[in-house]
Image: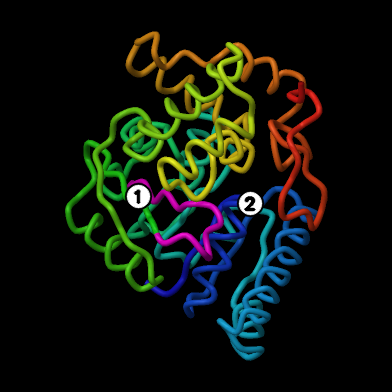
Amino acid sequence: MREIAVIGAGTMGNGIAHTFAQYGFAVSLVDVSSERLDKAIQTIGKNLDRQMAKGSITEEVKSKTLSSIKTYTEIPKGVAGAALVVEAATEDINLKLKIFKELDEAAPQGAILASNTSSISITRIAAVTKRPGQVIGMHFMNPVPVMKLVEIINGYATRPEVTQSIIDLAIQLDKTPCVVEDYPGFIANRILMPMINEAICSLHEGVAGVKEIDTVMKLGMAHPMGPLQLADFIGLDVCLSILKVLQEGFGQPKYAPNPLLVNMVTAGYLGVKSGEGFYHYTPGEKNPPVSPRFLP
């Protein structure tokens, strides 16, 4: 398994492509927009420069990594030789189902089709293909080149040998694989998103401020990042989408997104990606200030 296709050139897609290419795989990065592909390659180059500055890679590794990535704007061309396809499109069920139908038609018969989804059912995705035994979840964490965890999600029909091949592949990438079963939110987000939502509820009810909530969790619970800043980093729109999946999947009120989160997403305050969420972000700022909207 040396040829990998990655569908989607956003934050997760370019990170996944970067990681596979850095570890010697030939990568096809696919997106409908050539501009997004160009931006992704620029981002990968900048991230490789950061790794060089830290002494973790050499100039030769950077050059080989970039030369191992080819870009395509059409799925059939991008996946033609792939042994594994990793879908990293927007967390939208209808979009993912559409993509997997196309992947099933275009990818080689023996190829494994993986989704980087953070919450959507792998079983449901697999059901639109003619190869459900070869469909699996491969949920990387952001930033992909840095974070060690890969949450591997078995669909109802995923074959054991497919799971094992993805475990082995994650280890080749110097990641730590954790295998879980296909229930809403899997493990990572089933636990994380209610915590983030509860932090937003506490802010909304005036129990404490943004900085106070995050400081309690960092210093009291040894979290490297507070839940509100982490939500900004993930993207508040993504958090909202995952909470809706949990609410629909379990039908329990405890998963209902807080109205403050709904309003922020509706207004376009999405966190780091939009420049403002619970904190205000400027390029190069290592300690972003609390958004003026949440100051006394």
Element type at mark 2: helix
92 in the magenta segment? no
Element type at mark 1: strand
First to last magenta residue range: 135-148
Q: Position of residue 141 (x, y in %)?
A: 48, 52
Q: Amino acid at mark 1?
A: Glu
Q: Does residue 167 appear left or right of residue 142 in this picture? A: left
Q: Is residue 239 above or below residue 131?
A: above
Residue with the mark numbered 1: 151
- Residue visible at 44% across and 23% down in the picture: 245
Disc number placed over residue 11 in the picture, else none:
2
- Residue visible at 54% across and 73% down in the picture: 21
From the viewer's side, name the closer residue of 57 and 281.
281
Look at the image and tell me in which quarter the C terminus lies.
top right
- Distance between the Cα atoms at labels 1 and 2? 18 Å
Q: Position of residue 106 (x, y in %)?
A: 49, 52
